[in-house]
Amino acid sequence: MHILIAEDEPQLNAMLAKRLREEGYVVDSCLSGTEAMDYLACSEYDAAILDIMMPGADGYQVLRYLRSKETRPTPVLFLTALDGVQERVAGLDAGADDYLVKPFAFEELLARLRVVMRRNSGLVSNVLQVADLTMDLDTRQVSRAGQEVDLSAKEYAILECLMRNKGAVLTREKIGSSVWGYDYMGGSNIVDVYVRYLRRKLDEPFETKLIQTVRGVGYTIREPR
């Protein structure tokens, strides 16, 4: 999952980016609201963590810009030192999905991030399922027909992207940017390579194939009709 962090405290910014990457997220980070809008102009994100008081443009301005351009709602978590009720209400009324006051426990930030992303995807738990394929987002375990499947970090990230968008057709660019972020090279076949790896592990040993190619567009995962 591809996360944007906009936080003007360099040490906190670096810590958040490092810890989120360790949790398996793809992270882009910046130190100002204007930089955040530049990132948002170039890429879609699965969630954004925004400070409110930032140079260039504040978090409210960044959020308004995001909401004006997005084609699907992006979960937004405000992270700020402003702890008054009025500020919290203003943040939520501006369109944020949640609000976390500094100082905070990283574990709480992770939990709140999971909640807003789950809510945005219409999920009621942290277990994704397509037919007999399950993915536990808390333990990062994947199994098919009760058999645990060992996946690499990139294979897991691609599968999570597909399963969070079950039934939707995702372009290679969408999958690539979600898994590699700005390191994704649009002209490469890296997404196709990793989808082949996934099929060998998740589809070839079973009669029913779940990962489907949509010619000229990309991939989808869906339950058999």
Image (spheres, grey):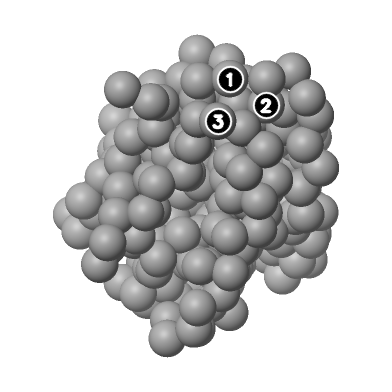
Name which of mark 1 and mark 2 comes first in the sequence.
1
Secondary structure at numbered mark 2:
strand
Q: Is residue 101 visible?
A: no
Looking at the image, residue 122 lies above or below residue 162: above
- For residue 178, side relative to residue 147 (left or right): left
Residues 2 and 185: in front is 185
Residue placed furthest toward the top: 124
Identify the residue position indicated by label 1 in the image.
132
Q: Confirm or deny contact between disc 1 and disc 2 (CB under 8 A).
A: yes
Q: CA distance from mark 1 to mark 2?
A: 6 Å
Asked whether the beta carbons under mark 1 and mark 3 sit within 8 Å of each other, the answer is no
Nearer to me, 146 or 89: 146
Q: Residue at x 60, y 26 (%)?
A: 133
- Which structural element holds mark 3? loop
Residue 181 placement (x, y as % from top left): 54, 69
For the residues labelled 3 and 2, say whether their Cβ atoms are less than 8 Å apart: no
- Residue neighbourhood size for the residue with mark 1, other residues' Cα within 10 Å, grouped as few (<14), some (14–19), many (≥20): few
| Residue 74 image point, x, y percent | 37, 44
Which mark is nearer the camera, 1 or 3? 3
Which residue position is annotated with label 3? Answer: 207
Amino acid type of the residue tagged 3 in the rendering: Glu
Name the residue located 21 percent from the left edge and 51 percent from the top edge. 71
**Residue 96, above or below 218:** above
Q: Amino acid at mark 1?
A: Asp
Distance of mark 1 from mark 3, alpha carbons?
Answer: 12 Å
Distance from the alpha carbon under mark 3 to that under mark 2: 12 Å
Q: Nearer the viewer, mark 3 or mark 2?
A: 3
- Residue drawn at x 59%, y 49% as measured from the top left: 199
Q: Secondary structure at mark 1?
A: loop
Task: Give the vertical position of 58 relative to 102 (above or below).
Answer: below
